[in-house]
Image (cartoon, helix red, strand yellow):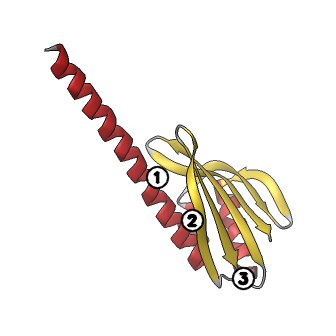
Amino acid sequence: MRLLIYIILIQAGLIAGLSSHAMAQEATAKINKAIKAGDAGTLSEHFNSTLDISIPGTDQTMSKSHATQVMKNFFKANPPQSYVENHSGSSREATKYIIGTYKSAITYKTYILLKEKEGKYLIVQLQFEAD
């Protein structure tokens, strides 16, 4: 009986872990697609209620709505030619990161930090740094 309970607990843990990993992969794919398209509206669906934005000329913590407007202006001034995810992973439990390269007239290194909140991965930090 103890063995059965132990096996059930292990399976539940594995399922929860796989579910969290799948959620992170789905969020990462949608975020990458939005950046590649220069779509601030879709990108903002993955913003936390407040987040840190660092782009040329702006480096501050702001609300989701303010961040959305800032990114709309950024994408308008720097329309995407391409975007490639270079690396992604986990830095600690419930925290994921994406490192990429965004090309417009200027090439930018991108750094995105996501945290799991209420069963969803949300962007808490977004950085575009001229390469």
The quadrant of the picture occupied by the N terminus is top left
Marks 1 and 2, how far apart in space? 15 Å
Which of discs 3 and 2 lies nearer the camera? The answer is 3
- Secondary structure beneath label 3: loop
Estimate the x, y position of residue 55 in percent, counting from the top left.
79, 64
Three-letter amino acid code of the residue under disc 1: Ala
Q: Which residue is mark 1?
A: 24
Identify the residue at the far front of this view. Answer: 3
Identify the residue at the far top of this view. Answer: 2
Q: Quadrant of residue 7?
A: top left
- Secondary structure beneath label 1: helix
Q: Which residue is mark 2?
A: 43
Three-letter amino acid code of the residue under disc 3: Ser
For image coordinates 43% across by 59% down, the residue present is 26
Q: Which residue is mark 3?
A: 104
| Contact between labelled residues 3 and 1, with CB atoms less than 8 Å apart | no
Q: Nearer the viewer, residue 18 or 34?
A: 18
Residue 126's place in the image compared with 40, above or below, is: above
